[in-house]
Image (cartoon, rainbow, N blue to C red):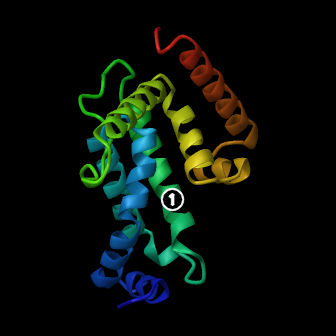
Amino acid sequence: MMDERKAIERWRQGDPEGMAALVRWYQGRALRIAALILPDPMQAEDAVQAAFIRAWMKRKSFRPDAPFWPWFRRLVANEAWRLARRESREAPAESGPVEEGGPDPASDPADDWEQRETLERLVQALETLSPMQRAVLALRYYEAMSEAEIAEALGCAVGTVKWHLHQARERLRAWLKTGGER
């Protein structure tokens, strides 16, 4: 079994096995970030695939002593944000959020239903946000990135990140107060 350092070394040398190891380790995590930014699961998959392609093309510029995930997370966020900006806000998502695995056979069906309903409401609330607002929320709360790290990842000013975070929180607060009615 190859560790991350060895996988990075092999990936930087152009060995597909090194890249395959990185894909196995980080694909699910990357998909969750992209799915928080993009309401359509197929677009989220496209963003992650594009980020892996970009990572392959930029492998020579990657610092070998640096951790892979923060660098790759930035590629994923940028790809998802790019796709989200390109898509029209008018086009509704035709499918729900990306799910991993099936229901837990030992769980209570009522709890499963309540969790699915809560998740659906969360997805609806997130769909009311702009792509930038979804991106900064995902990176701040899912990835626990600082505002400065988000600004660096998205290529914008810290003040812009703060403003989008504030606007997103206000919009979600208003959405929750009205029960999701527009």
Considering every residue shown, the one lying at the far right of the view is 159
In the rendered view, does 93 fall on the left or right side of 63? left
Question: Which residue shows up at 34% across the image and 76% down it?
Answer: 19
x%, y% of residue 140? 62, 46
x%, y% of residue 139? 57, 48
Secondary structure category for the residue under label 1: helix
x%, y% of residue 90? 35, 18
Q: Is residue 1 visible to the viewer in this orientation of the structure?
A: yes
Question: Which residue shows up at 47% across the image and 41% down it?
Answer: 81
Q: Of residues 96 and 24, which is closer to you in this image?
A: 96
Question: Which residue shows up at 56% across the image and 33% down it?
Answer: 133
The quadrant in which the N terminus is found is bottom left
Looking at the image, residue 73 lies above or below residue 6: above
Q: How many marks?
A: 1
Residue 58 occupies which quadrant of the picture?
bottom left
Q: Of residues 167 and 62, which is closer to you in this image?
A: 167
Q: Amino acid at mark 1?
A: Arg
Residue 87 occupies which quadrant of the picture?
top left
Looking at the image, residue 70 lies above or below residue 79: below
Q: Is residue 79 visible to the viewer in this orientation of the structure?
A: no
Looking at the image, residue 72 lies above or below residue 180: below
x%, y% of residue 38? 40, 38
Question: Which residue shows up at 53% across the image and 41% down it?
Answer: 135
* Label 1: few (<14), some (14–19) or many (≥20) C-alpha neighbours in 10 Å: many
Residue denoted by label 1: 73
